[in-house]
């Protein structure tokens, strides 16, 4: 497990340096997912609320299991910037491949997944596009009275491109592209086989609390 500890130290070191910067746009969607793949042919609808530094957001999602260990998700949201401006649409998508399955193989201490994502939003003052990769980990604890609790975490590294809206004839660079990182940590409460609730904290420039619900429809 030594390499896991070294990896975690590196992740938190990178994240710490990134969080010290104030110009990251960050995600309006959060994670609201564990490392467990949904399963082939299964589908979930989701809804989430983000209460964060840059924007208050409302998110809907559709997740579909493309194989036993791979799923993809489409996300559409409304984001209301906390520093003024109109409410705007945001779109995004992500996918993950679960390469550790602690339930199927007890040699793995927890579930792990790799994946990628993109997000786009256009505020009055700027538009932002994010494209990046992610690594997720989670572990499920079955409760005696039914259901389960699954703490989870996600680390992402992304290219964040921001284009600023400037008055005609103004001077200066109106866009910037930077490498950013982010962390999400939360817990899923699987209340029934088809209904789950989420609560998580996000640190990525749009720092805050995200709450969500997911229910199976396929």
Image (tube, rainbow, N blue to C red):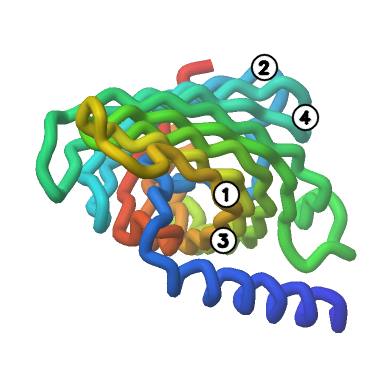
Residue underneath mark 2? 41
Q: Which residue is mark 4?
A: 68
In percent of the image, x 44 and y 74: which residue is there?
Answer: 20
Quarter of the picture holding the C terminus: top right
Sooner in the amino-acid sequence: mark 3 or mark 1: 1
Label 4 environment density (alpha carbons within 10 Å; few <14, some 14–19, many ≥20): some
Q: Is residue 187 above or below residue 10?
A: above
Measured as percent of width and height from the top left, residue 51 is found at: 23, 52
Query: Left or right of 149: which side holds 49?
Result: left
Q: Which residue is mark 1?
A: 34
- Crowding at mark 1 (Cα within 10 Å: few <14, some 14-19, many 20+): many
Q: Measure how far apart labels 4 and 2 are at the Cα level.
A: 9 Å
Instruction: Identify the image quadrant of residue 162.
Output: top left
Q: Is residue 137 visible?
A: yes
Spatial distance from mark 1 to mark 4, Cα to Cα? 15 Å
Pointer 3 or 2: first along the chain = 2
Q: Are marks 2 and 1 in contact (CB under 8 Å)?
A: no
Q: Report how far apart the C-alphas of labels 3 and 1 lie in the structure.
A: 8 Å
Sequence-first disc among 4 and 3: 4
Q: Are marks 1 and 4 in contact (CB under 8 Å)?
A: no
Which is nearer the eye, 162 or 10? 162
**Rendering coords of residue 157 (x, y %):** 63, 53
Q: Element type at marker 2? A: loop
> Is residue 12 found left or right of 173 in the rendered image?
right
Give the residue at mark 3.
153
Judged from the image, the secondary structure of the residue bearing numbered disc 1 is loop
- Observer-nearest residue: 30 or 192? 30
């Amino acid at each position: 497990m030594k390499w896991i500890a070294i990896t975690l130290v590196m992740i938190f070191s990178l994240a710490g340096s990134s969080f010290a910067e104030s110009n990251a746009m960050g995600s309006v969607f959060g994670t609201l997912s564990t490392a467990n793949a949904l399963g082939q042919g299964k589908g979930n609808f989701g809804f989430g609320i983000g209460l964060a530094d840059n924007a208050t957001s409302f998110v809907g999602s559709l997740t579909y299991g493309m194989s036993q260990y791979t799923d993809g998700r489409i996300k559409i949201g409304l984001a209301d910037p906390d520093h003024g401006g109109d409410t705007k649409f945001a779109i995004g998508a992500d996918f993950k491949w679960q390469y550790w399955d602690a339930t199927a193989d007890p040699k793995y201490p927890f579930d792990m997944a790799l994946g990628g994502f993109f997000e786009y939003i256009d505020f009055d003052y700027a538009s932002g596009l994010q494209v990046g990769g992610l690594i997720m980990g989670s572990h499920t604890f079955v409760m005696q009275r039914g259901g389960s609790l699954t703490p989870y975490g996600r680390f992402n590294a992304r290219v964040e491109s921001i284009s600023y809206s400037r008055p005609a004839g103004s001077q200066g660079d109106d866009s910037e592209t930077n490498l950013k990182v982010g962390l999400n940590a939360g817990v899923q409460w699987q209340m029934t086989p088809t209904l789950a609730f989420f609560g998580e904290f996000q640190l990525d420039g749009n720092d805050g609390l995200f709450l969500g619900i997911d229910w199976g429809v396929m």
